[in-house]
Amino acid sequence: MSPPPLVTVVVPGFDVAGYAPEALDSLRSQTLREWTAVLVDDASTDATAAVFAAAAVEDPRFRVVRLAERRGLGAARNAGLDLVDTPYVAFLDADDRMAPTALEHMVATLAASGSDFALGAYVRLRPGAGGRYTPGAVQPWVAASTDPARTGTTLREHPAASGNIVAWSKVSRSDFWIRSGLRFPEGKLYEDQIVAQQMYVRARAFDVLPDAIVEWRERADGSSITQRQAALPVLRDYLEAMSAGIDVLEGAGHDAAVDARVRLILAMDVPPLVRIAAGHPDDAYRRALGAFVRDLRDRDAATSPSPEISAALLW
């Protein structure tokens, strides 16, 4: 008999038929064989359901959940979480790819350390000539949260970890989600940002690995959520998620993590939004961004104002 699975990978997807085969292949290629995956089809209108169903027929480690109506990533991930019955849980968006040794390394460090979760680095998967996607290098702001390796650390010891805010860069103990009451917000974009900060403040300890465990796809057609930030509703959810994450850190008294998160947002997230706002036809976009930047400046007045910050403060 095959050994029981150690980790469940929750794989949500909406209209990802063109990308999902690569995501599923990346799971089949894992050096850790003792995994199972819950494929959550968020009421797709393309062939995603067929891709998921075929995978489940070919490999019993895959099982499929289809939502009757589209509910978003938060609800899809929660639906997968409800079916987790393994010691560990991970997430992989159905348009991304997981590195072959990701599960092996993450589970091994958790088994040895006893920590509640482990986080790793990730890279962008960018479109190129001929429709091919090429992974880039680990960006400095990603490396700041994951390099060097740490075992049994905490947010007080490693406040820069707060910059790693995506669901799919982590493997967790399943019981950590239960005893911490963790669930993804539903009906919102960027739903993993607040959950990541809740994980940091509620964990007894976590491990850090510098390895890139996921290749995060930047879609050639511009349909990824992070590529639609010129839309005012997307911006509002984005700003709300970042603010709520900072509130979690602040409420738990993690001042150094608050400072690290605010400075990273001002350096990395705000400048491209300012460029969008400068030519945006809706003044509400500029007002929302300006109010957000003023709030960040109030939280960390020591931050040196860049031209982008100065521009946003005037809106």
Image (tube, rainbow, N blue to C red):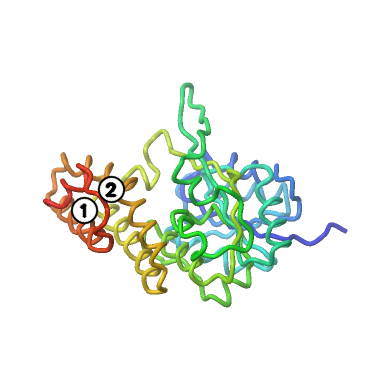
Q: Residue at x 28, y 42 (%)?
A: 272
Quadrant occupied by the N terminus:
bottom right
Disc 2 designates what residue?
Answer: 270
Can you name the residue that lies furthest to the right here? Answer: 1
Q: Position of residue 30 (x, y in %)?
A: 70, 45
Q: Position of residue 252 (x, y in %)?
A: 42, 74
Identify the amino acid type marked 1: Leu
Foreground pick, 163 / 54: 163
Disc 2 or 1, which lies upstream in sequence?
2
Residue 83 visible in the displayed image = yes
Can you name the residue that lies furthest to the top here? Answer: 129
> With 117 as the anchor, is 32 left or right in this view?
right
Mark 2 and mark 1 in contact? Answer it, CB < 8 Å.
Answer: yes
> With 54 as the anchor, is 44 left or right in this view?
left
Q: Residue at x 18, y 59 (%)?
A: 291
Identify the amino acid type marked 2: Val
Q: Which of the 4 quarters of the picture holds residue 178?
A: bottom right
Relative to 139, residue 264 above or below: below
Disc 1 designates what residue?
Answer: 289
Secondary structure category for the residue under label 1: helix
Q: How many marks?
A: 2
> With 57 as the anchor, is 241 left or right in this view?
left
